[in-house]
Image: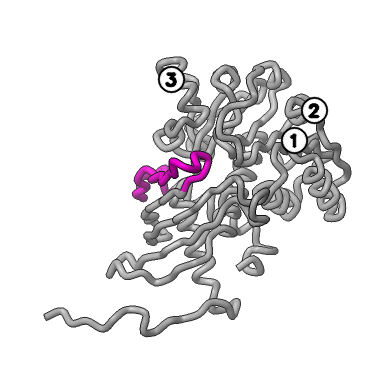
Amino acid sequence: MTQQIDGRREECVDLVRRAYLTHYRGESVNPQSGFLRFPQNPRARIISLPAYLGGEFDVAGLKWIASFPDNPRVHGIPRASAVLLLNDTTTGYPVAVLESSVISATRTAASAVLAAETLTGARRARRVGVVGTGVIARHVWNFLRDLGWEIDGFTLFDLDPAAAERFGEELTTEGAKEYTVATNVGQAFTECDLVVLTPGAGEPHVHDPRLLAHNPVVLHLSLRDLAPEVITSAQNITDDTEHAVRERTSLHLAEQATGGRDFITGTLADVLSGRVTVDRERPVIFSPFGLGVLDLAVGSWVHRETPAAGTGRTVPDFFTPTTTQ
């Protein structure tokens, strides 16, 4: 699967853009995600994301993604694991089951980099701050690199400074000009005009709106790093407001604190379509909940390309023969 994505990240970004616009036109069904939580492990969860994406895509399916934050430390395996089920929209029959952690990370990074370009107006950043230097950070960097972004340097922050150092060494090996490892999360904001917050935080830990005084673009992929007072100090762009303002996300907490949603400027599709214009003289925060339709767009593309890539396995007798009588 990775070999199908490597070298074709421009195509992935365009797929995500087209999926957002298809959803914007109302040619999709994207129910609220379901959260399975565990009383004995409250930080862990498994999320179901059913969706239908119409228009040029015409695909239905379900992503089932687990997030167990203790995995890297306790088990030495990634935080997230996922599968994607694709269904034929004529018969309803499942046609594919795909390992989906790479698909999920790919659509997250493609969405982030699409938002960065749309909200900044260029593929250029003086300095990029990265908070959390794990799998998603790696995928975002892959997109920035392959799409030819001009970046002067990186400021990296991770609760594990050694992990940040390793990530920085990878960046410079693959073409980044330079990096520094921050001693506190604030540095990743104040030194940078583009900030990437990767998933991991369960509750807000960034509380000072003055960190946005220089008007950066913040890719709030974690959804939960920023306190309400930071959220309300900026222009806020989501992927879908009804999805993003729930489950105690930072936007949800801001709604509870203010009693409304006036602090939300619009969606990324609003900006892509020209319905909403952002003020680049003010900070902008992009908080994508992560729509299932994006997984369908990328996953169905991967599935179509599987025969040409010589990967995948067909199971001809998967369904038990039945009669209609």
Q: On the image, numbered disc 3 is attached to which residue?
A: 256
Kind of element beneath mark 2: loop
Q: Quadrant of the N terminus?
A: bottom right
Q: On the image, numbered disc 2 is attached to which residue?
A: 191
Disc with the residue nearer the chain's start (2 vs 1): 1
Residue 272 spot, x, y in % from top left = 53, 40
Kind of element beneath mark 1: strand
Residue 14 spot, x, y in % from top left = 57, 53
Label tally:
3
Left or right of 252, for residue 73: right
Q: Do tag 2 and tag 1 residues touch (Cβ < 8 Å)? A: yes
Q: On the image, numbered disc 1 is attached to which residue?
A: 129
Q: CA distance from mark 2 to mark 1?
A: 7 Å
- The quarter holding residue 101 reads bottom right
Mark 3, Cα crowd under 10 Å, few <14 / some 14-19 / many 20+, is some
Disc with the residue nearer the chain's start (3 vs 2): 2
Disc with the residue nearer the chain's start (3 vs 1): 1
Q: Do tag 3 and tag 1 residues touch (Cβ < 8 Å)? A: no
Mark 2, Cα crowd under 10 Å, few <14 / some 14-19 / many 20+, is some
The residue at the point 84 percent across, 39 percent down is 153
Compared with residue 205, is residue 31 higher up or lower down, i.e. above or below?
A: below
Q: In this picture, which residue range is highlighted in magenta?
A: 22-45
Check disc 3 and give the amino acid type: Gln
